[in-house]
Amino acid sequence: MPSTSIPKDAAYQIINDELMLDGAPRLNLASFVTTWMEPECEKLIMATLNKNYVDMDEYPVTTELQNRCVNMIAHLFRAPIGDDEAAVGVGTVGSSEAIMLAGLAFKRKWQNERKSQGKPFDKPNIVTGANVQVCWEKFARYFEVELKEVKLSEGYYVMDPEKAVEMVDENTICVAAILGSTLTGEFENVKLLNELLTKKNNETGWNTPIHVDAASGGFIAPFLYPDLEWDFRLPLVKSINVSGHKYGLVYPGVGWVVWRSKDDLPEDLVFHINYLGSDQPTFTLNFSKGSSQIISQYYQFIRLGFEGYKNIMENCMENARVLKEGIEKTGRFDIVSKDDGVPLVAFSLKDSSQHTVFEISDHLRRFGWIVPAYTMPPDAQHIAVLRVVIREDFSRSLAERLVCDIEKVLKLLDTLPSPIGFTKEAHVAAISNETDQNKVKKSAMESQKEIALYWKRLVEGKKTGVC
Ligand SMILES: Cc1ncc(COP(=O)(O)O)c(C=O)c1O
């Protein structure tokens, strides 16, 4: 910390100037997280920045708005609650915190049951696909639960329900299915999982439940695929998380977790405090947090309603279609994502013998686009893809512009010598020689950096053509 103060406008200028070097959020196509909201909502955000959400007695209206949001989400996810019954759920900082809470509830419930049966309760596990988001790995490591991952394969990038159910044993606290895989946007087949797991539970006498990680899909499926059964309509689905700051259309960070019923959230995980006023139940990892995101979520719900969310999601799907068709037309890519799911386009190079998707990602940065490239998890780590997430503020004209810029990059790469000698070696060696997933990721990242450096040296002073 500096020893002396500076004028406020100088402090503002210094920081504002430095922040100019960040990427432009709306061109950040790597992220599912909302980058645009209406000015009216921004006004509400500014007006509530100084409210600590946890002061429920002091800000009872904010608490009430949170409860209304939980109720609306629970109804959207078809929780079996009566008209005058309150839903069981809580607002969080994002899906990660929501998943930690849901995971803890499963762990505690399983432990309580095992204790009551006089059985060991020290080796809990969760069954997931290898495509789970890193927050599941965090949960497993932080809360000492083994993560049993169903491996992927080329062309199949989600959890196979049959393999998942095969991996379930008496120590499985839940099977986690993803509605909208982070890697490809694909919805996992929760209905089939529910069927297979019900059969296994009946055969074994176990009671293994399902959690649905609907971080992205939770605000898509109810509007676009109302007949798709993935939610509390399926009896084994006991809890669901969703990110308010993704397709809930709120700035970061807000997430939600909703339980099927009171019985699915062990009472001994809920703390009761009274020093801020009346008795307040709290079940979150953090204590203090801002209120603005909760208020923004409520704004979006009443402002857009079902109709508004449906229109926005349909529009996103349409823009994803335009982008997908443009990318297909180049003739250079295979589309890895599916048409139904989260509106995103994931695509891999048909021929990566000369150049890689990592180079394309680097070159697109020069046009301002942030498009991530990554390798798939085991056993599909030899597939490398680019992924573009379509958000509300990504218009059709931006989709067309991006296709144009991808074509420019392809043309440029065709004129450049291939750095593939060492790149390919690094990439292939990473995949074939190392079984450890972290090492694979590291090697891919190292090779990506090497490509960028190599390329920068080569094209210094060169101009790109027009599309
Ligand atoms: C499927 C899935 N689960 C969980 C998360 C973590 O969500 P959050 O960033 O809201 O913590 C993500 C983030 O992309 C995700 O895609």
Image: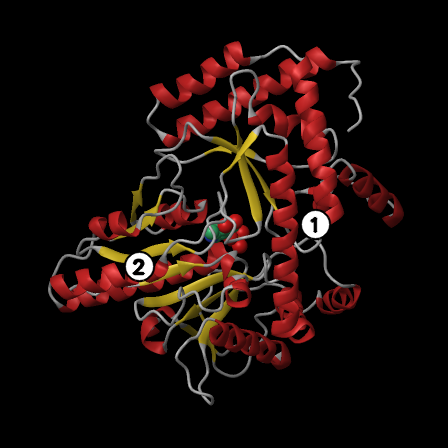
Q: Splitting the image into 4 quarters, where does residue 87 fall?
A: bottom left
Asked if residue 326 lies left or right of residue 461, the reply is left
Query: Residue flagged by tag 2: what amino acid is it?
Result: Leu
Query: Residue flagged by tag 1: what amino acid is it?
Result: Phe
Q: Quadrant of the C terminus?
A: top right
x and y percentages locating residue 155 in the rendered image: 40, 37
- 291 or 318: nearer the viewer: 318
Q: Splitting the image into 4 quarters, where does residue 172 fall?
A: bottom left
Residue 394, numbered label: 1
Q: Residues within 10 Å of mark 1 (few under 14, many from 20)?
A: many
Please give the name of the residue rendered at 36% of the width and 59% of the height, measured from the top-left corner: 190
Whether residue 397 is visible here, answered yes or no, is: yes
x and y percentages locating residue 126 in the rendered image: 29, 52
x and y percentages locating residue 415 in the rendered image: 68, 13
- The residue indicated by pointer 2 is 192
Q: Nearer the viewer, mark 2 or mark 1?
A: 2
Which badge, 2 or 1, is on the more N-terminal residue? 2
Q: Splitting the image into 4 quarters, where does residue 263 fall?
A: bottom left
Q: In this view, does 24 lie above or below 37?
A: above
> Is mark 2 in CB contact (under 8 Å) with mark 1?
no
Q: Quadrant of the N terminus?
A: top right
Please give the name of the residue rendered at 55% of the width and 82% of the height, measured from the top-left corner: 277
Q: Is mark 2 within 8 Å of ligand 1?
A: no
Residue 41, numbered label: none
Q: In this view, does 380 lie above or below 131?
A: above
